[in-house]
C-alpha cells in the first residue's frame, strides 16, 4: 500500500475537499444603453464613459 512521505496538513486536506468553487461575476445591464457591464463600475461605450446610466466623460477627438 502507498504511504505518504509527509503528513498532509488539515488545512491543505480541507481545501481539496471543499465545495466552495469560484463563480463567474454577475453582470448588470445599463438602463440607458442596454450594455452589459460589471456592477458598480464605469464603462466606455462609443467614446463616452457611463456610470449609473449617465455620461461622466466624453472622449475628445483630435482633429
Image (tube, rainbow, N blue to C red):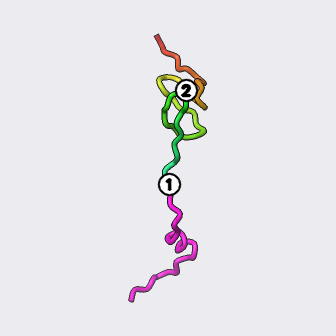
Q: Earlier in the sequence, mark 1 or mark 2?
A: 1
Label 2 element class: strand
Question: In front here: 19 or 3?
Answer: 19
Callout 2: few (<14), some (14-19), or many (20+) C-alpha neighbours within 10 Å?
some
Question: In front here: 59 or 48?
Answer: 48
Tag shown at residue 23: 1
Taking the view exactly as shown, the residue that stands out farthest to the bottom is 1
Q: Residue at x 53, y 63 (%)?
A: 20
| 23 up-or-down from 62: above or below | below
Q: Residue at x 56, y 28 (%)?
A: 50
Label 1 element class: loop
Location of residue 42 (image quadrant): top right
| 21 up-or-down from 62: above or below | below
Residue range (magenta):
1-23
- Image quarter in which the N terminus is found: bottom left
Return the x and y of residue 59 as percentages of the image width and height: 53, 20
> For the residues marked 1 and 2, what is the alpha-carbon distance in whole angstroms?
27 Å
Taking the view exactly as shown, the residue that stands out farthest to the top is 63
- Membership of 17 in magenta stretch: yes
The residue that label 2 is drawn on is: 49
Amino acid at each position: 500500500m502507498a504511504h505518504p512521505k509527509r503528513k498532509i496538513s488539515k488545512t491543505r486536506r480541507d481545501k481539496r475537499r471543499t465545495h466552495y468553487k469560484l463563480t463567474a461575476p454577475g453582470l448588470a445591464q445599463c438602463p440607458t444603453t442596454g450594455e452589459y457591464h460589471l456592477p458598480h463600475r464605469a464603462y466606455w461605450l462609443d467614446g463616452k464613459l457611463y456610470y449609473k446610466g449617465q455620461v461622466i466623460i466624453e472622449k475628445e477627438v483630435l482633429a
